[in-house]
Image (tube, coloured by chain):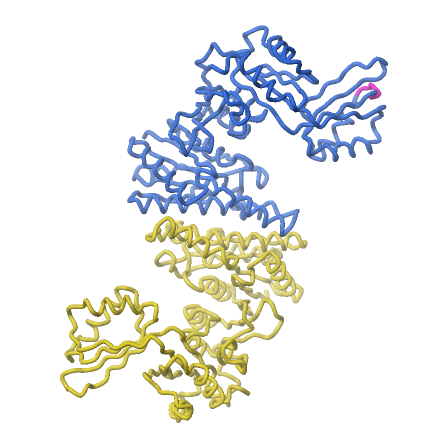
Chain colours: A yellow, B blue
Amino acid sequence: MKIVVLKFGGTSVGSIERIKKVCKIIINFTKKKYKVIVVSSAMSGITNDLIKKSRLISKRFSQSEYDVLVSSGEQMACSLISARLCDLGFNSKSMLGWQIPILTEGNHSASRIVGVNKKIINNMLRTNVIPIVAGFQGINSENRITTLGRGGSDATAIMLAKFFKAKKCIIFTDVEGVFTTDPNNYKKAKKIKVISYEEMLEMASLGAKVMQPISIQDARLNRVDINVKSSFKNTNGTLITKKRSMQSNKVIRGITFTKNDAKITLVGVKDKPGVAASIFKPLSNNSINVDMVVQNISSNKKETDLTFTIKSEDFSKTDKLIKKNQNIKFRKLVFDKNVSKVSIIGVGMITTPGVTYRMFQSLAKKKINILVISTSEIKISVLINKKNIKKAIEALHKEFNLDK
Amino acid sequence: MKIVVLKFGGTSVGSIERIKKVCKIIINFTKKKYKVIVVSSAMSGITNDLIKKSRLISKRFSQSEYDVLVSSGEQMACSLISARLCDLGFNSKSMLGWQIPILTEGNHSASRIVGVNKKIINNMLRTNVIPIVAGFQGINSENRITTLGRGGSDATAIMLAKFFKAKKCIIFTDVEGVFTTDPNNYKKAKKIKVISYEEMLEMASLGAKVMQPISIQDARLNRVDINVKSSFKNTNGTLITKKRSMQSNKVIRGITFTKNDAKITLVGVKDKPGVAASIFKPLSNNSINVDMVVQNISSNKKETDLTFTIKSEDFSKTDKLIKKNQNIKFRKLVFDKNVSKVSIIGVGMITTPGVTYRMFQSLAKKKINILVISTSEIKISVLINKKNIKKAIEALHKEFNLDK
């Protein structure tokens, strides 16, 4: 059997008209003799409505019941798609997590798929019944509904593609694919045809919102090739795969940026072992994510300056936590809420020397000051003043030949 | 174990504030050492929204997927109730049809409960976990979600009360109980304390909207006593039971009326065997419900006049069906769309002579003309002109001492 997994995101099924369009896409694949497994998210807006209701009940809403509540969104979407296909003369059934079943482990609302029973769906495929699988949901060993957290429907699609050895796994969404940089911010951004898991993982982690990093990691670990494409326009999307990029002349594949970071510097911190841990532990306990961290040697050698970045929305909470922290001593807290992290990503940089130099030089030419630097094997991030984002992206996009 | 089943209708859980109120009611029962099984409908409005969506997909929406779609409404409500109880320090779990499971038979969207697995819920009750059971839903032998049709959540409550041998089954709703007649129409209407299944069945069939006739029949067949009461006001409701009414001085228990009936008379129908069947078969095939039927002997003995009533919304369809019906011949079709059926109900009339006479006399005194009469063992219905409804109810309410 030539199996394809088609996953539709919330905006793709966001209205009755769009659901009808989605059904056309599904039917086109059956016409090409594919055995189609559909995975659907909830109609856009529905999940947020449900979450709003849960918050009105309690801020400590039971995690287990939260999963029962929000999973109803995918249930609705699947039944609508399935009924539409039936109405058009096709055979189709919605399949909820418990009906397959999709087995999960881990905490409620952040579970992971550990098993998929193939029997019922294989029977359906053999008898030309199109299964419309509810994304984002499964059941645990106690027969309770679980959900998979952010990007959960992508995870469902990827795991089904793995278990059913699908020829293709196509993620239909509201963008045309993965771009060299955000096309809303820079018009010369180009769609990327093929990108490696690792590059996509960095792109996603650093701000490209096409897929959640955890889903890309799922695909990478399970060696599932993913096509990301638009459910609105019939254009080629982006293939995310293990294969090395074909456009090998391009060292850098993409440029990402963040818009709402804040930088904090603790000046004159007493330099002794464990001081960084003392600073970051209470932040971590309060779910504040620290991103870039740099420690500068201060003039006074018994002291050090510690700089780190956080989301700007976490600033006031962070400020309070640090000031009431008895375990650390410092002379001054300096902050800047108008910073942005710009990153270049590409596996090419492993084998190509001089990428760092080219990045810094092209920013310097535009008189853009670099505040903090952070690097990994396949990406370089710099912190700059927020007002320079556009200028920086333009310069880097040209420097690394992404305009072409 | 002293078990009570508490069922909450759509308006009772119609907002977050109302769900919080419902939880107070539940907690009060646990304080009285009851083991509580809760059954909830969907929040009011939700089911209609889902049905609207289904109609936009197709007017022939798959019945099986319809059940998947609409059952999500109860799923939401149950998780919200359960999470609220957890938040208040109680132990509670939502329980969906497939989790118990509640087994059903029959067509989709009109299934009947045939079995309830008691194991999991008994375990919950023993360990003080409050089960919040999704009303209206179950699964069939093919592991597909089924729903129970109109009044389905009441059916769930009644069947759970039966299987768990509950001491009480309380249906919480938006009215205070069953009244002698509609209090919105006649201010002197009185709440009925105790009513027999049979009387309630007639009341419900004839227009009292507290419960669906099918649910009352369920309760009667399974000998489950039902308390109907308000979830908003803490007043005594109405007990529906097999016991003979304690208020034995009252022959008549209630008066109902319809507002949108139409009367059709076929004048000069050729009187031969099978003619009534020929008239009513096409109506039945088109789901038109014929209520009262009277056949008068015409002056010409080879002809007869046939009068029957239908819902006025079915009038034009009925008119067409009769006129194009080749199998019947008649001289004239006469209709009246301004009629109303007023009924008096009471098991007392079986043993009390003169009820019919008293009814007709009191209407005659008010100069109300009776168009059609129909009787059963415990009810008498008359068709009158719609403009006389109020006057008729006032007269009958007084005549049968219901004002007191």
Q: What's the residue at 55%, 7% (across, down)?
A: B352
Give percent across and percent down for residue B208: 54, 26
Q: Is B343 in front, or is B336?
A: B336
Identify the residue at the far top of this view: B353
Rendered view: B26 above or below A47: above
Q: Is residue B88 left or right of residue A200?
A: left
Q: What's the residue at 45%, 47% (across, down)?
A: B76
Q: What's the residue at 51%, 73% (across, down)?
A: A225
Rendered view: A290 above or below A58: below
Give percent across and percent down for residue B376: 61, 16
Which image quadrant for residue B329? Answer: top right
Which image quadrant for residue B381? Answer: top right
Rendered view: A98 above or below B205: below
Residue A352, visible in the rendered structure = no
Give percent across and percent down for residue B149: 56, 37
What is the magenta segment's predominant secondary structure?
Answer: loop
For the C terminus of chain A, which image quadrant? bottom right
Assess whether residue B186 is covered by the magenta stretch.
no
Q: Is residue B275 left or right of residue B236?
A: right
Q: Is residue A335 left or right of residue A352?
A: left
The region drawn magenta spans B269-273
